[in-house]
Amino acid sequence: ARERTVLFGGASGASLMGSDTWEWDGTSWIHRQPVKHPVSRSAAAMTYDVVRRKIVLFGGSGASSNLSDTWVPNRELLRGARGFSTRLA
């Protein structure tokens, strides 16, 4: 809906911090630092929900276990820095 790609977390030898959130606008990467965010993880799944017009982040591998949580960003996440809110799977 906003014509952006969102990248969250990942791994570079170790899981990157939960605040490692980036947005690609087609020209450049913008580093976003939401106040509220999921815990650090790698190998998570993220998709776009066309009905709700929101991205959804699910699971992944945390520091000590596999995760099965679901997160949906607040609409202000990529414009300001409010962050994510949890949702039950």
Image (cartoon, rainbow, N blue to C red):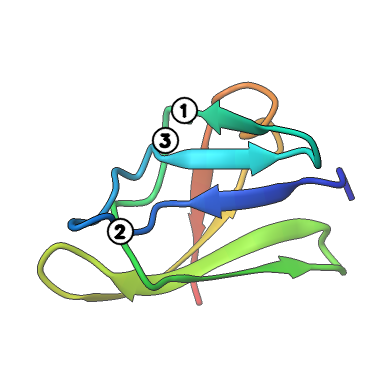
**At which x and y percent is residue 61?**
27, 72
Amino acid type at image mark 1: Gln
The residue that mark 1 highlights is 33
Q: Are marks 3 and 2 in contact (CB under 8 Å)?
A: no
> In the rendered structure, which disc, 3 or 2, sits on the residue that comes first in sequence?
2
**At which x and y percent is residue 66?**
24, 78
Of badges 1 and 2, the one in the foreground is 2
Label at residue 36: 3
**At which x and y percent is residue 2?**
86, 43
Amino acid type at image mark 3: Lys
Q: Residues within 10 Å of mark 2 (few under 14, many from 20)?
A: few
| Rendering quarter of residue 26 | top right
- Can residue 34 be seen in this snapshot? yes
The residue that mark 2 highlights is 11
Q: CA distance from mark 3 to mark 2?
A: 20 Å
Q: CA distance from mark 1 to mark 3?
A: 9 Å
